[in-house]
Image (tube, helix red, strand yellow):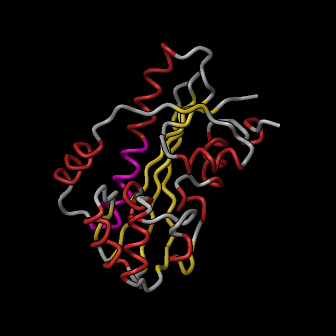
Amino acid sequence: MKTLLLGSASPARRQTLINAGITPLVRVADLDEDSLIEAFAAAHPDLDARTLATSQVQLLATSKANAIYDVVRTQHDPQPTVVVGCDSMLEMNGVIVGKPHTPEVARERLHAMSGQVGALHTGHCIIDVETGQHAEAVSTALVYISQLTDAEINAYIATEEPLHVAGSFTVDGFGGPFVERIEGDYHGIVGISLPLVRNLLHELGHSITEFWKL
């Protein structure tokens, strides 16, 4: 059986893989994500919000995968077959929305998102540890947010769930009832697109079924 090392601390990404028959190893990259994003935005001031968002999530996903790949090549024994890096951002009304971190920012964002449609972008990078080959792509799905009451927003923030996720909401937790519908891959919204992972593994000469733990 082949093994997959997930470069993310996200419980949702890990659980998504487990539900699909893949039990990943987990290792978190030591990256200054804010500095990477700020430097990229400063170097590309003319990009529209959609292009900037997709470029940034791919940059972070690739940077995470590369950082972990550099470590596992020399330190991890036995070595995994592939390393997977992911990153997600919400783009809404021409604004890129990352993790709020504080209740105040989360409250402001949830009020702004109420009744709106956002695009959730998730960058993916898979590296074959033996060959060093990369395969990468971004999944995008539209998310339709319900009209939220102040009481719902306050209760949601009290769970602390929206403080540490892209866009200040989840579709697979307390935030699920506030998502009217989605257009695109559900798993991409959770944080890792299974169909896209399948395709990227295929590009590298692997079948996703070879990673199943039966």
Specify whether residue 159 is painted magenta. no
Using the image as rendered, state which of residue 131 and residue 77 is in the foreground: 77
Judged left or right of residue 3, residue 173 is left
Q: Position of residue 192 (x, y in %)?
A: 56, 52
- Please say if 179 is above or below 67: below
Q: Residue at point 54% right, 33% down?
A: 26
Judged left or right of residue 117, residue 112 is left
Q: Quadrant of residue 98?
A: bottom left
Using the image as rendered, state which of residue 134 and residue 94 is in the foreground: 94
Q: Position of residue 163 (x, y in %)?
A: 37, 58
Chief secondary structure of the magenta portion? helix
Which quadrant of the rendered structure holds the C terminus? Answer: top right
- Range of the magenta residues? 48-61
Judged left or right of residue 203, residue 114 is left
Q: Residue at point 18% right, 50% down?
A: 43
Which quadrant of the rendered structure holds the N terminus? Answer: top right
How many discs appear? 0
Q: Residue at point 31% right, 71% down?
A: 107
Q: Position of residue 41 (x, y in %)?
A: 21, 54
Using the image as rendered, state which of residue 59 and residue 189 is in the foreground: 189
Residue extending furthest toward the right: 214
Q: Residue at point 60% right, 53% down?
A: 196
- Please say if 42 is above or below 68: below
Q: Position of residue 3 (x, y in %)?
A: 67, 29
